[in-house]
Amino acid sequence: MIISTRTFYLRDKRNFPIATVATELSELGGVFYGITSWNPKDVFDKALSREIAIGRLEVNPSYLPVHENFKRAVITDIANRRDLPKRTREAAQRWLDAPRTEFMEGPL
């Protein structure tokens, strides 16, 4: 059973969204996610981006067997995936490298 579905955005150096991540926490532990990255030549469409990310979550999700720090685990996985565009991986790495407080981590 799935507990909740949430989305968040990875942003470039200018703070423009370049990727949308849809996540679902599993009742048994772990997190599923789907991601969509935008081409720099495209105009970002928030609704379409969410729809695509959620569709990928439903059809072909990635799974991480973690029990805490779900958002950080997902972003770390994205930063290390070689099947994603370089700018998406770099945005994930920037998020990981930024100083954080517990408040800034936010909910998944």
Image: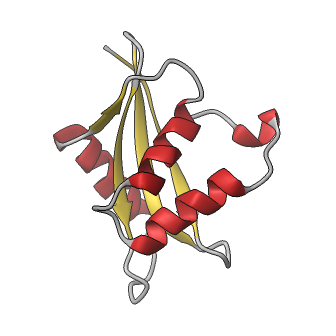
Which one is in front, 44 or 62? 62
Q: Residue furthest bottom?
A: 41
**What residue is rendered at 56% in x and 65% in y?**
91
**What residue is rendered at 43% in x and 45% in y?**
77
* Horizontal side, residue 13 vs residue 60: left or right: right
Q: Is residue 83 above or below residue 41?
A: above
Q: Quadrant of the N terminus?
A: top left
Q: Quadrant of the C terminus?
A: top right
Q: Residue furthest top?
A: 28
**What residue is rendered at 28% in x and 42% in y?**
57
* Horizontal side, residue 66 vs residue 57: left or right: right
Which one is in front, 103 or 44? 103
Q: Is residue 58 above or below residue 30?
A: below
**What residue is rendered at 39% in x and 12% in y?**
27
How many discs appear? 0
Asked which quadrant contains residue 12, the reply is bottom right
Across and down, in percent, residue 82 comes to: 32, 61
Q: Is residue 83 visible?
A: yes
Which one is in front, 102 or 1? 102
Q: Is residue 46 visible?
A: no
Q: Residue furthest left?
A: 59
Which one is in front, 95 or 7? 95
Across and down, in percent, residue 32 comes to: 35, 33
Q: Is residue 42 above or below residue 93?
A: below
* Horizontal side, residue 41 vs residue 59: left or right: right
Asked which quadrant contains residue 31, the reply is top left
